[in-house]
């Protein structure tokens, strides 16, 4: 019988093949949401919460964050006002060249809040986080654990405006923008956080010099909220062999949700 691990490895192999034939136009954009969900439905043969003790090293107790981001007292306390405040924000230099402030996508009564790094070109164009191939792949993988933007997931980035040329965020930009994220977490009150990529993972765990591979695979805590760290979906497109690790981290996230 085909196992879920072999299915995930198969998915990783498929991605690798697309990369090897230099398929720049990643295949997911050609799928409808229904087609994509049909493909990933094979991952859901069993409840994802019960048997994911495979190769991931886990801790029963969440690891506490060492570096909480401090809330900014002057930020609005209502969600609507916070969003409007961000849409007009000029706190850092990224305001100069942005097309959009990319505040969030998904539902406000979310179980899970996904946190990435910063908007890219597609996000800057549309004002929506995680669109394009990486965003579609993220949606596909989230669907394997019954998470979706439409029903139970909220998605945002640490930075709300695009760094030019997708360069790394600068410390002053993080300092200026991260209070928005802190307030979003306070207002959304998710059951769990999923940090995707080393930047968000290091920031939220406070382990700023630790490789992502050493942060993932266990449950951390960000100001009392369980936090799972995994790879950025764009990194999976470049390194398909990480797909199974991402999927394992989603199983860990599902365990957290089921135990709440
Ligand atoms: S990146 Fe954040 S702090 Fe900087 S202008 Fe945009 S919303 Fe404001």
Image (cartoon, grey):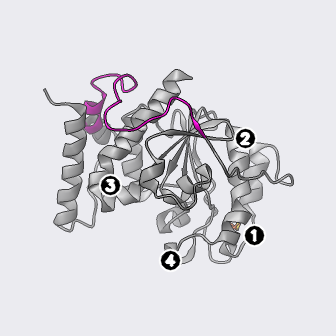
Relative to 109, 77 lies left or right: right
Relative to 251, 79 lies left or right: right
Q: Please report the residue visible at 38 percent of the width from the left and 59 percent of the height from the top.
A: 235
In the rendered image, which residue does mark 2 sit on? 186
Report, in whole angstroms, how far the alpha carbon at label 3 lies from the one at label 1. Answer: 34 Å
Q: Is residue 196 above or below residue 142?
A: below
Relative to 198, 236 lies left or right: left
Image location (x, y in percent) of residue 13: 19, 51
Q: Please report the residue visible at 19 percent of the width from the left and 44 percent of the height from the top.
A: 10
Quadrant in which the N terminus is drawn: top left
In the rendered image, which residue does mark 3 sit on? 29
Q: Earlier in the sequence, mark 1 or mark 2?
A: 1
Please provide the residue range marked out in magenta. Answer: 39-63
In the rendered image, which residue does mark 4 sit on? 165
In the rendered image, which residue does mark 1 sit on? 90
Quadrant in which the C terminus is drawn: top right
Q: Please report the residue visible at 41 percent of the width from the left and 44 percent of the height from the top.
A: 139
Q: Earlier in the sequence, mark 2 or mark 4?
A: 4
The secondary structure type at the circle numbered 2 is helix
């Amino acid at each position: 019988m085909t196992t879920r691990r072999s299915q995930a490895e198969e998915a990783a192999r498929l991605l690798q093949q697309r990369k090897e034939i230099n398929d720049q136009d990643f295949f997911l954009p050609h799928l409808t949401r229904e087609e994509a969900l049909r493909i990933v439905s094979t991952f859901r043969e069993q409840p994802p919460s019960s048997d994911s003790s495979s190769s991931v090293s886990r801790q029963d107790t969440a690891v506490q964050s060492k570096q909480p981001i401090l809330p900014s007292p002057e930020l609005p306390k209502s969600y609507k006002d916070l969003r409007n405040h961000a849409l007009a924000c000029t706190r850092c230099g990224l305001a100069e060249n942005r097309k959009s402030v990319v505040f969030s996508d998904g539902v406000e009564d979310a179980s899970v809040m996904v946190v990435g790094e910063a908007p890219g070109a597609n996000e800057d164009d549309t004002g929506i986080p995680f669109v394009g191939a990486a965003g579609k792949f993220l949606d596909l993988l989230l669907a394997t654990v019954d998470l979706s933007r439409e029903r139970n997931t909220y998605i945002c980035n640490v930075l709300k405006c695009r760094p030019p040329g997708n360069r790394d965020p600068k410390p002053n930009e993080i300092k200026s923008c991260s209070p928005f994220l802190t307030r979003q977490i306070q207002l959304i009150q998710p059951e769990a956080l999923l940090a995707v990529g080393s930047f968000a993972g290091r920031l939220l765990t406070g382990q700023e010099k630790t490789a992502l591979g050493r942060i993932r695979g266990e449950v951390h805590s960000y100001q009392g909220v369980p936090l799972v760290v995994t790879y950025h979906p764009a990194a999976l497109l470049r390194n398909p062999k990480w797909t199974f690790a991402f999927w394992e981290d989603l199983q860990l996230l599902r365990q957290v949700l089921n135990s709440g």
